[in-house]
């Protein structure tokens, strides 16, 4: 994982972007890319989201740069691709890249739910803000969850917070319709509901809450 993060840092610096970029950096790179801006935005987000680097700036920037609808779609595509790459990296390497912290009690809690509950577990865990995006990707790769349930759950579980944050970014420009503000609020509430869903879903050897 340290090697992967180091490679990402080198590539990001080659393009003049820090590993925790500011909005101005993202906008500069996207605008300099002309009609390829959306593609570059997605690739840059994937590059910096496979390692455990923060992704909030990309989500908010998407709303400012592309608007609520296009920004949400681009961010979800980037989110799905980053999740796929991290998942497959762990599967291909046999989990060696993250084995050091995989037995942490919280990591074990997440893995056990992924092992037994598939798409529902992935979706509900993605809705929980306290479960970091990158860590979830790695733990899914270590678990018994299959690829398609993982991908579907990732998209479904990431959508509420993505819509809310992209809408927030679009609101800064003053172009956001009031109806989308309502949608972003509902999505934020759905995200909070994920905490209750994951906590109350029992494992086979646990009593129901």
Image (cartoon, rainbow, N blue to C red):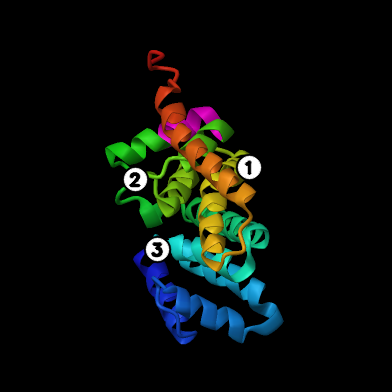
Instruction: Using the numbered discs, state the Cα–Cα distance from disc 2 to disc 1 in whole angstroms.
Output: 23 Å
- Element at badge 3? loop
Residue 149 position within the rendered picture, expressed as x and y whole percent measured from the top left: 61, 38
**What's the magenta region?**
111-118
Residue 114 sits inside the magenta stretch = yes
Packing grade of label 2 (10 A; few <14, some 14-19, many >=20) is some
Residue 180 sits inside the magenta stretch = no
- Element at badge 2? loop
Residue 44 position within the rendered picture, expressed as x and y whole percent measured from the top left: 54, 72
Packing grade of label 1 (10 A; few <14, some 14-19, many >=20) is some
Where is residue 134, by image quadrant? bottom left
Instruction: Using the numbered discs, state the Cα–Cα distance from disc 3 to disc 1 in whole angstroms.
Output: 23 Å
- Element at badge 1? helix
Residue drawn at 48 percent across, 35 percent down: 114
Q: Is residue 155 above or below residue 76?
A: above
The front one of 67 and 10 is 67
Between discs 3 and 1, the one toward the N terminus: 3
Residue drawn at 42 percent across, 62 percent down: 51
| Total numbered badges shown on the rendered structure | 3
From where the camera sits, is residue 55 visible?
A: no
Give the residue number, with chain letter if any, for mark 2: 102
Residue at the extreme top: 207
Where is residue 108, by image quadrant? top left
Q: Is residue 16 above or below residue 96?
A: below
Residue 165 position within the rendered picture, expressed as x and y whole percent measured from the top left: 50, 55
Give the residue number, with chain letter if any, for mark 3: 53
- Locate residue 104 relative to residue 115 in the image: left or right: left
Residue drawn at 54 percent across, 82 percent down: 29
């Amino acid at each position: 994982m340290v090697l992967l993060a180091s490679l990402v840092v080198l590539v990001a610096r080659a393009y003049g972007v820090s590993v925790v970029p500011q909005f101005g950096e993202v906008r500069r790179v996207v605008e300099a890319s002309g009609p390829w801006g959306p593609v570059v935005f997605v690739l840059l987000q994937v590059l910096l989201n496979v390692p455990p680097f923060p992704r909030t700036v990309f989500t908010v920037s998407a709303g400012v740069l592309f608007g609520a609808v296009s920004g949400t779609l681009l961010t979800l595509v980037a989110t799905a691709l980053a999740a796929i790459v991290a998942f497959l990296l762990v599967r291909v390497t046999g989990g060696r890249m993250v084995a050091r912290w995989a037995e942490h009690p919280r990591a074990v809690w997440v893995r056990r739910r992924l092992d037994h509950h598939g798409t529902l577990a992935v979706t509900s865990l993605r809705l929980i803000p306290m479960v970091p995006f990158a860590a979830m990707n790695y733990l899914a790769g270590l678990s018994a969850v299959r690829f398609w349930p993982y991908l579907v759950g990732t998209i479904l579980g990431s959508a509420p917070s993505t819509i809310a944050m992209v809408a927030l970014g679009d609101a800064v420009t003053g172009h956001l319709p009031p109806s989308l503000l309502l949608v972003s609020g509902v999505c934020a509430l759905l995200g909070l509901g994920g905490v209750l869903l994951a906590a109350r879903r029992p494992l086979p050897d646990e009593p129901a809450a």
